[in-house]
Amino acid sequence: MKKLRHIVEYVITLILVGFIRILPVRLGLAFGAFLGRLFWIIGVRRRVAERNFSLCFGERFTKSERNRILARSYENFVRSAVEFVIMPKLLRKGTVKFDGIEYLKELANKGSGAILVTGHFGNWELFGAALAHEGIPIGAVVARQTNKMVDKLINSIRKRCGIEIIYQSESAFGIIKALKSGRQIALLSDQDARERGVVVKFFGKEASTPKGPALIALKTGVPIVFCLITRESGGMNHTAKFFKPIYPPESTKSIDDTVYQLTARITKMLENAVEKEPEQYFWMHRRFKSTLGY
């Protein structure tokens, strides 16, 4: 039964991918925005999104303003999914411009790896593909899909764009190996990390946050580069911004304290970005599940 379900899922995915690829880019993005708005209207994970937003912003926005922002967040997410399917085409069109990429190029020229930390903001998948297209040796840590056929399809798109795939289940060894070869590794660092994470503040609320970036930086000595990709005015153009590299201290009295400080620092940088453009953030994951119960 499970195998049959996976086959059906795969066939449906192939049909959607084929449909999206034959559409003109702007029409495909409009279709994505329509689906995103539809998912918001019918209530897909709506309670989670509303609760997260309220936890982070309190009464700062009116209900209508909150709903408008969250609806745009849903639109951005599905637009991004459409863009993922056609990433090679988008890269040829030059839809991504860069701010601060000289930091990465300088590291690449030295043969140095780097830990690129971002969040579920803008189109995070396009971010890695755009870097590879720009000539940055890039790897990405990804979750393995339970449907092996869908997993292979998704990763075939990433690989076509020049991204090396490192599964989360083998991430420690794979990341260190890739960093030693001079590859820069992209990590999403804003999902609930349960008991494996370090608890830092996100919008003033305690949140279990992945400590992998900080631990790997301490172990390897490579810098952490916080980065974001932002969609411009809801359209097909994006700006990828890179902040100054954060080098781990050469020595530390307390590894736990250093991990906390580094993780809190990059989490605050993400918070600042979300505060400025909340419609770019993916509000549907249960960010505070470990610490607040949802």
Image (spheres, rainbow, N blue to C red):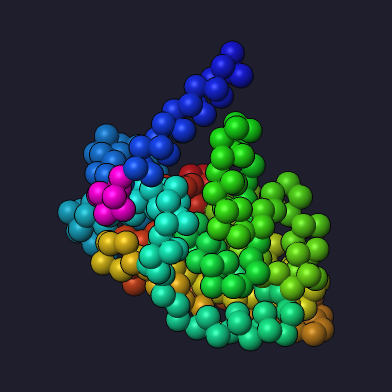
Instruction: Return the residue nearer the eye: 30 or 169.
Output: 30
- Is the residue 215 above or below the residue 30 in the image? below
| Residue 39: x %, y % from top left | 30, 39
| Residue 49: x %, y % from top left | 37, 48
- The answer to if 29 sits in the magenta stretch is yes
Residue 174's image quarter? bottom right
Main secondary structure of the magenta stretch = helix
Instruction: Return the residue nearer the eye: 44 or 177.
Output: 177
Query: Where does the magenta region start and end?
Result: 23-30
- Is the residue 58 above or below the residue 136 in the image? above
Q: Give the residue at x 45% y 63%.
A: 91
Does residue 25 appear left or right of residue 87 in this picture? left
Instruction: Return the residue nearer the eye: 282 or 257.
Output: 282
Instruction: Confirm whether residue 167 shows in the render.
Output: yes
Q: Give the residue at x 54% y 63%.
A: 128
Does residue 91 appear left or right of residue 152 in this picture? left
| Residue 191: x %, y % from top left | 55, 54
Q: Give the residue at x 53% y 80%.
A: 101
Q: Give the residue at x 25% y 39%.
A: 38
- Is the residue 168 above or below the residue 102 in the image? above
